[in-house]
Amino acid sequence: MITLLQNIKYHPAVSDQVRRYYRFRCRNLKKMVFVATTGRSGTMTLGDIFNAIPGCKAEHEPYPAMFDDVLTAKSLGNEDYVRNIYWRIKSINLWRAASGYEFYFESNHMFVKTYIEYATQDFGERALIIHLVRDPVKVANSIYALQDFPGTVEGNKWWLDYRTADNLLAIADILDADEEFRHPFYKGLWYWYEMEARIASWKQKLPQVTFLRFRTEDFNDHEKTCTLLRDIGVDFDPDRVAARISTKSNTRPDQKIAEPLPASEAAERHQRFREFLLARGLIA
């Protein structure tokens, strides 16, 4: 239940004034960096790197994380709810968190799913997006091991529900009923391709916004990681960056319920799924 105090705190007239205050405090902010990704892709490693650089601040899925009820509202077309949550709460928290820094980075794979259009409008030419890409088989296998894949109650809070009408790759009938593709591993693969399709769509819709593509495997290449930071405009110590890259973050071993599929089986399933998507004209 929303209290009287919360109603006052989040009233548009109040939130607009608070936003103006924090925007003033962010007068030295150069870039607000977001990540467009599936998750399970190295977002926390990026955050660790940013937090090792003076003048930079990174947070992982800070409040409000824009998941669960916000994602459900977005999927069902309840845009008023999503818009209000962003402008009355999320926006203010972002400006507050960035206060006093030159660069702020939010690692949150809900960005593309729920609030990319509002954040890019909010931060204008300060907004920059890292398109972080991990191999689809590895993402799907990571989700499979967690057993919270799309279509489950827990999975629909964070990933995507493959049954909703807003999906670009609308193949719920296949994922539910086909003898081959109803295996839960394919729901993770579907999620990867759906997210890449959404990111590609937003790149076209937002030509004024810089997208920097970076592969998760490129963390193993020190120079490529440094190139990414230079492209963002960050002044950094390469040795401190190297120390952060060597540490893996958020592997969640304690939350993995099932063993990942063997690499050969996962690759074969991916090949069959990709051929199916190609035959349907869903990917190029």
Image (cartoon, grey):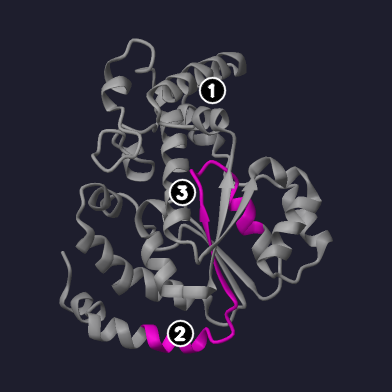
Considering every residue shown, the one lying at the far right of the view is 239
Toward the viewer: 236 or 65?
236
Do callouts 1 and 2 mark residues in contact (Cβ within 8 Å)? no
Toward the viewer: 195 or 39?
195
Q: Amino acid at mark 1?
A: Pro
Q: Amino acid at mark 3?
A: Ile
Question: Which residue shows up at 37% across the image and 68% down it?
Answer: 90
Question: Which residue shows up at 80% across the image and 52% down it?
Answer: 223
Label 2 element class: helix
Task: Verify whether residue 29 appears in magenta.
Answer: yes
Task: Verify whether residue 18 appears in magenta.
Answer: no
Q: Which numbered marker is on residue 199?
A: 3
Q: Amino acid at mark 2?
A: Arg
Q: Quadrant of the N terminus?
A: bottom left
Q: Which numbered marker is on residue 260?
A: 1
Residue 137 x, y percent position in the rendering: 55, 27
Q: Which residues are magenta?
A: 19-48
Q: Is residue 202 left or right of residue 27?
A: left
Residue count near mark 3 (Cα–Cα under 10 Å), binned few <14, some 14–19, many ≥20: many
- The residue pinned by badge 2 equals 23
Residue count near mark 2 (Cα–Cα under 10 Å), binned few <14, some 14–19, many ≥20: some
Q: CA distance from mark 3 to mark 2?
A: 28 Å
Q: CA distance from mark 1 to mark 2?
A: 45 Å
Residue 220 shows up from this direction: yes
Label 3 element class: helix
Question: Which residue shows up at 49% across the image and 23% down it?
Answer: 274
Which tag is nearer the camera, tag 3 or tag 2?
3
Placement of 228 over or under 247, stated as above or below: below
